[in-house]
Image: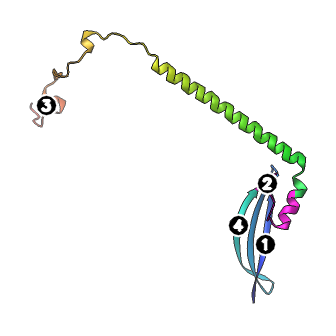
Amino acid sequence: MIVPVDIISVQVNANNSLFVTTGIDYDSNGAIVGSEITSQYTLVPGDDLTGQPTEVVSIANALWTPAVVAALAKKAAEKAAQEAAVKAAADAQAAAEATAQTTTTTTELRSEQIVDPLILPTSDVPPSVDGMSTNILG
């Protein structure tokens, strides 16, 4: 007879977060004949533990002291402040570049720079050289 057995695996990461894997092993007379992962997720210090398996709650309560939770919150706040400063600097640079592009000076065109759309320029190159003719001899 095959009996399903609930299993849980908890991996503690360097930042005291928990990587939780739950699953089912199928046992037949003491031998595992199959296995199935039902979920995988990460919990970080300060996360709500409501509904978590007792093993997860026990490990989290042992690791997640108030000092650990406070240190993680401080680190997250510092990271958010740094990202905000980087974004503000990038926004300021983009605004400065946009301002520089809109404040270009205008100059007068010389007569040779003005093209009349009704008088199109012609080529001085023979057709056989410029690819406009299929006749090789021009």
Residue 39 badge: 4
Residue density around tag 3, few if under 14, some if 14–19, many if 20 or more, within 10 Å: few
Per the model, the C-alpha gap separating discs 2 and 1 is 22 Å
Residue 47 badge: 2
Residue density around tag 1, few if under 14, some if 14–19, many if 20 or more, within 10 Å: some
Residue 7 badge: 1
Per the model, the C-alpha gap separating discs 3 and 4 is 73 Å
Q: Closer to us: mark 2 or mark 4?
A: 2
Q: Closer to us: mark 3 or mark 2?
A: 2
Q: Closer to us: mark 3 or mark 4?
A: 4
Q: Are marks 2 and 1 in contact (CB under 8 Å)?
A: no
Per the model, the C-alpha gap separating discs 4 and 1 is 11 Å
Sequence-first tag of 2 and 4: 4
The type of residue carrying mark 1 is Ile
Per the model, the C-alpha gap separating discs 2 and 4 is 17 Å
Q: Quadrant of the C terminus?
A: top left
Q: Position of residue 35 (x, y in %)?
A: 71, 75
Residue 4 drawn above or below residue 114: below
The type of residue carrying mark 2 is Asp
The type of residue carrying mark 4 is Ser
Which of 122/99 is in front?
Answer: 99
Q: Which residue is mark 3?
A: 128
The residue at 66%/31% (across/down) is 86
Per the model, the C-alpha gap separating discs 3 and 2 is 78 Å
Chain part drawn in magenta? 43-60
